[in-house]
Amino acid sequence: MSAQEHLRQDIGARVAAWLSAVARVPQDGFTPVERFDDVPAQARADSFYWCDSIFRSELNPHNEALGARHAFHAATDDTPDLLRHELAAGGLELTVTEGRNFILVQVERSSLDILSLCGPDRTSAVRRVAEALFNTGVESNTIGVPPAAGPPAAGPVAGPVRCPVPGEVPDLEEGTVFSSNPAVDPDLLACWKDRTECGVQGGRLYFLCYKKSSQRAGFANASQWFDDRRTGVG
């Protein structure tokens, strides 16, 4: 097995595990909060930081004008600590689920039934949603696939998340998973924007972003995100 194939399998297993963990939590497994200030302090601060970095302000769950509904789920034996934001903006109904290491954005079928579209229209819809969702002002030192057509830039690049890779038209079906930059190892990301996963699960289009920066090596324990609340600190 080649190193690239081994990397692909490892990443696929990690993403599948995160998606499964989220799916195991029923709707009533999340505790709604009236104010986001009621969320455990460390997770609250992380959420503000990563949502501000990843999302355009028009679709940021913390944009008060959108009136997002917030909830949290404390870890169990087989689920991690999670936050959930539900909102409607830009013609999209979104469920945004945060773990300590990722942000999962699911587009509800009521606003985009991706599998009802034909062939290339599915890919075009994915690109449109990615452009609507993600912050274009973040600079990225992408290694691997250039962030736009043409040769790689000499320095940091700001621009849209391009998922799928420019020029590719993946076969979008239930269970499909693909990446904005498949050559990059998520463990080594210097910026969340360097790699985004995309796919279809339960008929819903989703994007998965890694909470990664050059200062953050590896991934943290996903069941210890709310520890400040458990110890009475936050």
Image (spheres, rainbow, N blue to C red):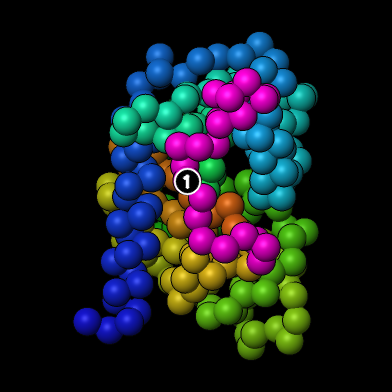
Going by the numbered disc 1, the residue's amino acid type is Asn
Residue at left offset 62%, top offset 34%: 43
Relative height, residue 190 to residue 114 (above, below): below
Residue at left offset 44%, top offset 54%: 198
Question: Picture coordinates of residue 62 (x, y %)?
Answer: 71, 31
**Does residue 109 appear anywhere in the picture?**
no
* Front residue (pair 158, 38): 38
Residue 155 picture quarter: bottom right
* Front residue (pair 33, 124): 33
* Front residue (pair 130, 16): 16
- Residue 137 lies left or right of residue 51; in this view the side is right
* Front residue (pair 173, 119): 173
Which residues are drawn in magenta? 213-234
| Neighbour tally class for label 1: few under 14, some 14-19, many 20 plus, Cα within 10 Å | few
Q: Residue furthest left?
A: 1
Check if residue 223 falls in the magenta segment.
Answer: yes
Task: Determine which residue is flagged by label 1.
Answer: 221
